[in-house]
């Protein structure tokens, strides 16, 4: 490997099976910084969002200020942040949409069946619940749980009341 410096460019030249590979180190470092900046933007958007945004909500929020960011980048960064435990991922809803959460401690959620809104439910988490579950016959080992309450949010209930459709099932 040979390093070559000319002005602002640093090049790495490698011979691999008689093929010449040239890499512009500045471009690689710029991409790493860009990805870091995009990830930081994604994290900041989740932390600033009031509630539990979907990936599309976060994308729209970021794209309003940074139009060059792609939807795929936002989705990838959300997945990465959730895997790293920096944000929460809430996904067991009837509509199948994934929502993200700035709270990472274990807590429960409510899901509105009308509009899809996700809210935190202030119920103490039963830390002993897993110990109460009988071992499964097939040897399945439970390592965590998620509890989601379904219902109708305050805004949708008020709309129903205004429209005279309160209590009518879809």
Image (cartoon, rainbow, N blue to C red):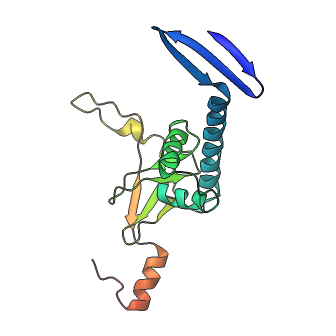
Residue 140 left/right relative to 33: left
Tally of numbered tags: 0
* Left or right for 170, reference 92: left
Q: Answer with left or right where residue 122 lies relative to residue 167.
A: right
Residue at the location (32% across, 59% down)?
A: 94
Against 169, is 97 above or below?
above
Against 85, is 149 above or below?
below
Q: Nearer the viewer, residue 152 or 114?
A: 114
**Coordinates of residue 22 in the picture (x, y in percent):** 57, 20
Q: Is residue 129 above or below residue 91?
A: above
Give the residue at x 65% y 25%. Answer: 25
Quadrant that contains the N terminus? top right
Q: Position of residue 156 (x, y in %)?
A: 43, 78
Residue 131 appearing in the image: yes
State the image quarter where residue 48 is shown: bottom right
Quarter placement of the C terminus: bottom left
Furthest toward the right, the residue is 7
Is residue 122 visible to us here? no
At horizontal 42% and vertical 63% (from top left) the residue drawn is 111
Q: Residue 118: x percent and y percent?
A: 47, 62
Pick the front one: 122 or 161: 161
Q: Residue 151 versus residue 12: which sits nearer the camera?
A: 12
Residue in view at x 40 percent, y 34 percent: 143
């Amino acid at each position: 490997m040979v390093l070559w410096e000319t002005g602002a460019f640093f090049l790495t030249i490698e011979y691999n099976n008689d093929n010449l590979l040239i890499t512009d180190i500045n471009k690689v470092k710029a991409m790493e910084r860009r990805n870091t900046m995009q990830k930081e933007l994604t994290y900041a958007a989740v932390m600033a969002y009031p509630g539990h945004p979907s990936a599309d909500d976060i994308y729209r929020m970021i794209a309003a200020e940074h139009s060059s960011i792609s939807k795929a980048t936002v989705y990838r960064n959300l997945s990465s942040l959730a895997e790293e435990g920096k944000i929460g991922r809430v996904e067991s809803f009837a509509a199948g949409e994934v929502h993200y959460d700035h709270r990472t401690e274990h807590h429960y959620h409510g899901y509105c069946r009308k509009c899809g809104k996700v809210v935190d439910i202030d119920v103490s988490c039963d830390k002993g619940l897993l110990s109460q579950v009988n071992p499964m016959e097939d040897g399945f080992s439970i390592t965590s749980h998620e509890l989601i309450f379904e219902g109708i949010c305050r805004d949708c209930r008020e709309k129903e009341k205004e429209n005279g459709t309160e209590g009518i099932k879809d």
